[in-house]
Amino acid sequence: MHNTAFAEQGLNVAYAACAVAPEAVGDAVAGLRALDFAGANVTIPHKEAVIPHLDALTERARAIGAVNTLFWDEDGRLAGDNTDAAGFRAPLEGHAEHLRGGDLLIFGAGGAAR
C-alpha cells in the first residue's frame, strides 16, 4: 500500500518491514541514523523501548509515553511522535454530541487507549 502510493507520487522511496528483537532496538535506531532513513514506524513491543534512543519527542508522544513514528525534526534531531490517539479520535469527532455523557468501552490497552 505504502510503496504503491509512493510510486504513484513519483517518489524514490520504499517502505519495508524489519523484524527487530527487543534487545536490538538501540542498534536498529543506530542503523536508521547511519543509513539516513527518512523516518520509520514503530510497533509493539518497541513503542516504549525506543524512546531512550531518540533525540526528541513531540508533546503528544511525551504525554502518551509511547512512540509509533520516527522522523527528523527541523533541528535535525531524530524525533518520536505518536499518532495512535489521533487516529482513534478522528473518526469519533463528528459524533461528540452522541457520545458525551455516555459510557465507552475500549478493547485493549495499546497506544490508542493511553
Image (tube, rainbow, N blue to C red):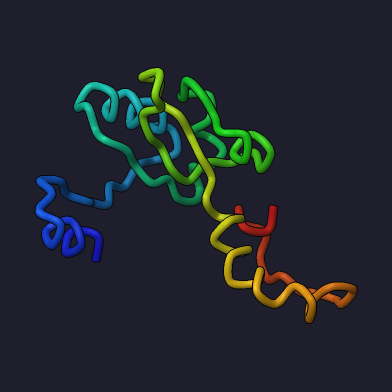
Q: Position of residue 30 (x, y in %)?
A: 32, 23
Residue 84 versus residue 108: which sits nearer the camera? Answer: 84
Q: Is 93 left, or right, of 43 in this rendering? A: right
Q: Position of residue 109 (x, y in %)?
A: 67, 59
- Hey, which residue is sitting farthest bottom in the picture? 98
Is residue 48 depicted above or below 99 in this figure? above
Residue 48 versus residue 40: which sits nearer the camera? Answer: 40
Is residue 87 depicted above or below 19 in this figure? below
Which image quarter: residue 102? bottom right
Report the residue at 65% width, 74% height from top: 94
Report the residue at 79% width, 77% height from top: 97
Q: Position of residue 27 (x, y in %)?
A: 34, 26
Q: Position of residue 23 (x, y in %)?
A: 43, 32
- Hey, which residue is sitting farthest right in the picture? 101
Report the residue at 22% width, 51% height from top: 15
Quadrant into which the N terminus falls: bottom left
Q: Is 73 left, or right, of 109 in this rendering? A: left
Report the residue at 45% width, 38% height from top: 22
Residue 33 versus residue 56: which sits nearer the camera? Answer: 56
Q: Is 60 left, or right, of 27 in this rendering? A: right
Which image quarter: residue 91? bottom right
Q: How many marks?
A: 0
